[in-house]
Amino acid sequence: MSARGNFSSRIGFILAAAGSAVGLGNIWKFPFEVADGGGAAFVLIYLIFAFILCFPVMVTEVAIGRKTEKNPIGAFNALGFRRWNIIGKFGILCGVLILSFYNVVAGWAFGYFLEMIVGNFGIGDTFGTFTSDIVKVGGYAVVFMLTTAYIVSKGVSGGIEKLAKILMPTLIIMILSLVAYSFTLPNAIEGVKYYLVPDLSKLTNVNTIGGALRQAFFSLSLGMGALITYGSYLSKKENIVSSSVMITLFDVGIAFIAGLMMFPLVAYNLGGEMSNVQGGAGLIFVTLPGVFETLGGTLGVIVGGFFFLLLSFAALTSTVSLLEVPVSFVVDEYKMKRTKAVIIMSAIIFIIGLPSLVGNGYSEFFTNAFKLPGGSTDFMTLVGYITDVLLMFGGFLIVTFAAYVWKKENLAEEISQGYPGFNDSIIKKLLNFCISYLCPVLLALLFVMVVLNNFF
Ligand code: PFF
């Protein structure tokens, strides 16, 4: 065991990486992106992208991390390609920016948990008032950041792995129980249809395609070196390909199930009129409390509390991975003590997150002053777009680097440790094809498409 720490088991690594992947992105963002992106067509494209474009990036990230046992900047230096450490620099910047707003939304989820357990179901109608109550949401954001910092300070196997081993199975049980419940509601089937029967005309819609790719990268925590970091704590005995398959299936599976839970609830709320569905960041925060209320007193409190607790848990295993990226960087490169690194980084990120915190109603400027082609937007949405695009670009650079700079043979050599038959397998041929041609070409094209579509 190295001084940096290690995952103590394969399942620990898989659960921690899946914990990073599964988060607000799956339960909060995925359903509203589906609603914004046109329903089932979005889901279909998202699934295809996750497997053909994202999975190869994941394998590459984990392999680079494990080979070098370094953070995302140190990894490129250790391979001897210092100039390419720009990928890691962007990655760390991206991680810092994502955590800065992610922590705010995680705070809302935690706040909603507290509101549900005291039976305040009316909160859904006053979501805007809730997010502008700076004392409350600020307090929740502080609590969430402190919890994240505490776990990261405990290190890899003692903090991150332990947390994931408890929370991930709990989360699955919670979410499946909610799916079962949502299916019993009137009009559930309308929601399921909206979610699963694609409108074929939308398959060529630029918004749908771009949104699905952005969502896939964000949801799988790819393109910024989070999995380089987690891979750096992975033992040489483990099979990177099968672990990545599990992580991808886990993440996509949970997003899929979250949709199965969400759309029947939305359909129930809308009386089956799915043409009235409204996406947007408020989807679960506005719609769900009302649904829980209809369950009546104690049951509503239990199911509602349960749901938002689940959301907070899912967020926590992701905030932990987001903080671990810059922390591993300062621990490795500046030989700083983990605890000190955690305190400094979480304080900086919290401060960077202040505009996102006040930009949901409290400060008029940060709520409306930013322009995207679709109209004015809030600071958090803007940062969300920028980081989504950076993740895609990071993914493009990572596969291009592996295929043409570090070279496929070196990547294959790393993968074959822990996967002895890899070099003679069809998987290797497929992976090489994806990394050398499919991913760089498609990611470059889609990147240009998304940038033009969203920013010009
Ligand atoms: N994948 C997380 C989610 O879906 O909520 C968000 C995320 C975590 C993105 C870690 C990037 C990352 F490095």
Image (cartoon, helix red, strand yellow):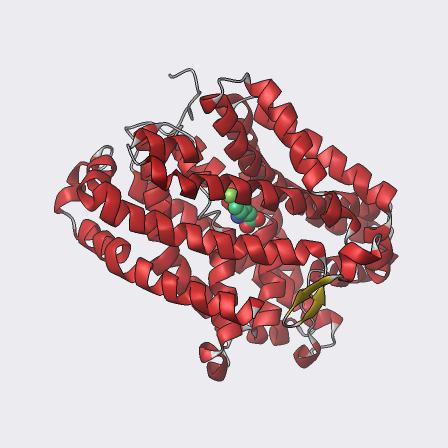
| Residue appearing at x 63%, y 67% in the figure | 263
Residue appearing at x 50%, y 77% in the figure: 197
Asked if residue 214 is positioned above or below residue 452 in the image, the reply reads above
Is residue 310 visible to us here?
Answer: no
**Percent coordinates x, y for residue 19 in the rendering:** 52, 41
Where is residue 326 drawn, in percent x and y?
Answer: 53, 32
Q: Residue furthest bottom?
A: 201
Q: Quadrant of residue 385?
A: bottom right
Q: Is residue 234 left or right of residue 432?
A: right
Closer to the camera in the image, 431 or 248: 431
Q: Quadrant of residue 354?
A: top right
Total numbered circles: 0
Query: Where is the C terminus found, in terms of image quarters?
Result: bottom right
Residue 108 shown left or right of residue 398 in the figure: right
- The location of residue 428, given as percent across then percent down, is 20, 49
Q: Residue at x 71, y 70 (%)?
A: 268
- Can residue 351 be seen from the camera position used here? yes
Q: Is residue 412 left or right of residue 182?
A: left
Identify whether 115 is placed above or below 288.
Answer: above
Q: Position of residue 414 (x, y in %)?
A: 24, 35
Question: For this rendering, which residue is in front, 192 or 329?
Answer: 329
**Which corner quadrant holds the N terminus?**
top left
Q: Is residue 222 left or right of residue 307?
A: left
Among the 4 quarters of the image, the one containing residue 65? top left
Q: Residue furthest front?
A: 83
The residue depicted at 32 percent of the width and 29 percent of the height is 78
